[in-house]
Image (spheres, rainbow, N blue to C red):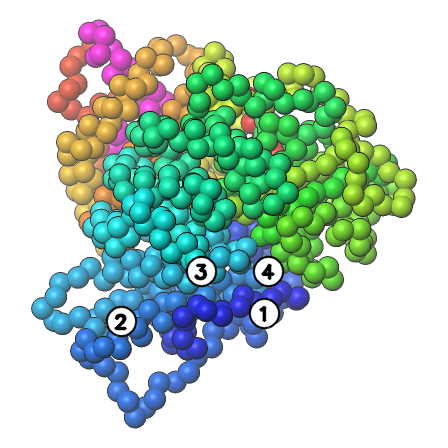
Amino acid sequence: MGNSCVCRDGSDAEENPGPPGELGVAERRGHPPPLLSSSSSSSHHRHHSQHHSNNAEGEPRSRSRDPVRPPRRGRGPHEPRRKKQNVDGLVLDTLAVIRTLVDNDQEPPPMYLNKLNLALGLLVMFSIVELPSDVQIDPRNEGWLEVVQSLIRVIPLEDPLGPAVITLLLDECPLPTKDALQKLSEMLNLSASLAKQDACNPAKHRNTTAVLGCLAEKLAGPASIGLLSPGTLEYLLESLSVQSHPMVMLFSLIALEKFAQTSENKLTVSESCISDQLLMLESWVNHSDYLKRQVGFCAQWSLDNLFLKPKRQFTYEKVNLSHINAMLNSNDVSEYLKISPDGLEARCDASSFESVRCTFCVDSGVWYYEVTVITSGVMQIGWATKDSKFLNHEGYGIGDDEYSCAYDGCRQLIWYNARSEPHIHPCWKEGDTIGFLLDLNKKAMIFYLNGNQLPPEKQVFSSATSGFFAAASFMSYQQCEFNFGAKSFKFPPTVKFSTFNEYASLSPEEKIILPRHRRLALLKQVSIRENCCTLCCDELADTELRPCGHSDLCMECALQLDTCPLCLLFGTGDRMVEMEDSEDDNLATSDSSAVDAEFDTVIGHIEDIVMDEEFQQLQRNFMDKYYLEFENTEENKLIYTSIFQEYIDLLEKYIEQQLIERRPAFNMTTFITSLQQHKDEISGDIFDMLLTFTDFLAFKEMFLDYRMEKEGRGLDFSGDLVVTSLSKSSPLPQSSHNIQPF
């Protein structure tokens, strides 16, 4: 398929990566990351008839053990080395096979389908072999630590997919325990002086900062705060110095951004005078070196959105937009995608597969735009229609439905309807120009690499003939710049064409891309009806989805869905839906005594967790921060959405982390799906508290009760859980800029 594997020179990995995967493939814990395929979906999500066999490239190599030499049973001098080489080989094989796992129907070899679980299984085996019988150890912690150390040790600096593989492996891993995080901090022993060492080995520092960023994104509350120790903060700040490799600078800044998702960490980082360092790095925003340009982009974004500098003018206030009539639409993307103030450059540093489209839509004629590649990893760029459906956390992007088509220059593929075909262009690299021609008269799409064109693509026109937008989807740590005609094209096609910038128009207000904190301030001033559709926020919620029973949508929005968005939001799995009139259903209950026993055990642990002073303090601090925002009216402020999401990210993740420490096999998705089935068996306070994670009205009433108590207008609940029971579900308010299906 034209995909190349990554060179392993200098990796220290032995030639034999370890035994083939006979440990079995465990069920995936969450959504499959988009590295594995364009849509990153397991075959049970979507079924296609087309297969691309890559077994020759993707199968792990294996060698039989020397039958004359039995395995060691003690702590011989070669044992730690043998463990390291097996884990290192697995990590490097993962990096190499990523380029070949592209088709959604293709079942990868078991060794790669659940790479991290296999790695942990191997490490458990090695731990048993190596450690004396009198040493007590948690093999899961030990295995997790070995994988993290291997990621830091062997991922090469020059591979564009290296950081994304770090994200993939850590994202597949359950949340680490407190002990594992403590041991990791002790092993790394980070400090400012360490950041200055090994300047000739920037890969180690880049990988360390990438690991820190991934963990900061996964963790919440005390765990994230504890990970950002004074030594870790000094290490990250020192890594921002211009003496560091630009790649190390970039991922240090990204790690600091992700740590700042926790409010206490954000305050800590801001007090370090980081804004002074970022002011200098911001000057690289248009640097000819594309790596430094990424640093400049992220520095400017951080100064505008996170680490504000007093008296510094925001970029959107000074950028010249008078010549720009078409740009990326910042109003229908998630908060995880970074868009430049001029609306023409986009970057994704999240673990999700983020998508964006242009503000201008075309129905006829011939149109052309160009993209400059800033990073050479996985992006799917091309054309989408208003009917396209993108699910960032499920890995669905441009080219993953019948209404869009995309060019992938990293894996050298054309994507349509979640199926891929190889193209003859070489892999794209930083600075390359990709051209996109849409001929609606001849019903053809033509893709160009630095002026060299591919044969026309026509298959999308069997489903769509009008309503096309320029659009793109981004894997982690990817960035590119769009040219919709505001400046001269580098490789204009020979045919006559029109440009978006020539025909589109935007008002001065529509061109403004506000920083997050200013957008949130505006949302505080907006209210919506309580019984409106959770997607469009305009129509009455009058439709129920089956089989999940969610009934917070209007019929118009429901008809555009394949899966229930509320099930995806609350982690209750992928639910294919059919529409019916709203009515109550009886929920099925499990007949399995084993399942019931496991559920009872988990509830017992939850009772211990929520009654612990640490959780109580975490909840009270959060409610003290926001209770004044809540008013006892039927209308819901849009600011409630962000508060609700922050509450879930903070407290639900905290409970999940605590449960995993007590029961390593705990799965939050499985637990939530069985919660309603056992609601009559659970203590009222515990059920009401858990309900606040999935039911907005319960969440809102909790805050209203708390406000009444704080203002002396209600009962004193200081000795109890601050929750209120609920008789019916209520729609979760969504911001008005998400009203159109993407």
Label 3 crowd (10 A; few <14 / some 14-19 / many >=20): many
Callout 3: helix, strand or loop? loop
Q: Nearer the viewer, residue 138 or 402?
A: 138
| Amino acid type at image mark 3 | Ile
Residue 659 colored in magenta in the image:
no
* Quarter occupied by the C terminus: top right
Q: In whole angstroms, how far apart are the C-alphas of marks 3 and 2?
A: 19 Å
Q: Does label 4 or label 3 sit earlier along the sequence?
A: 4
Residue indicated by mark 1:
54
Residue indicated by mark 2:
80
Residue 739, located in which quarter of the rendered image?
A: top right
Q: In whole angstroms, how far apart are the C-alphas of marks 2 and 4?
A: 37 Å
Q: Which mark is residue 103?
A: 4
Answer left or right for 441 relative to 714. Answer: right
The percent position of residue 324, horizontal first and vertical second, equals: 72, 25
Q: Does label 1 or label 2 sit earlier along the sequence?
A: 1
The percent position of residue 363, horizontal first and vertical second, equals: 80, 33
Q: Nearer the viewer, mark 1 or mark 2?
A: 2
Q: Nearer the viewer, residue 299 or 42?
A: 299
Residue indicated by mark 3:
155
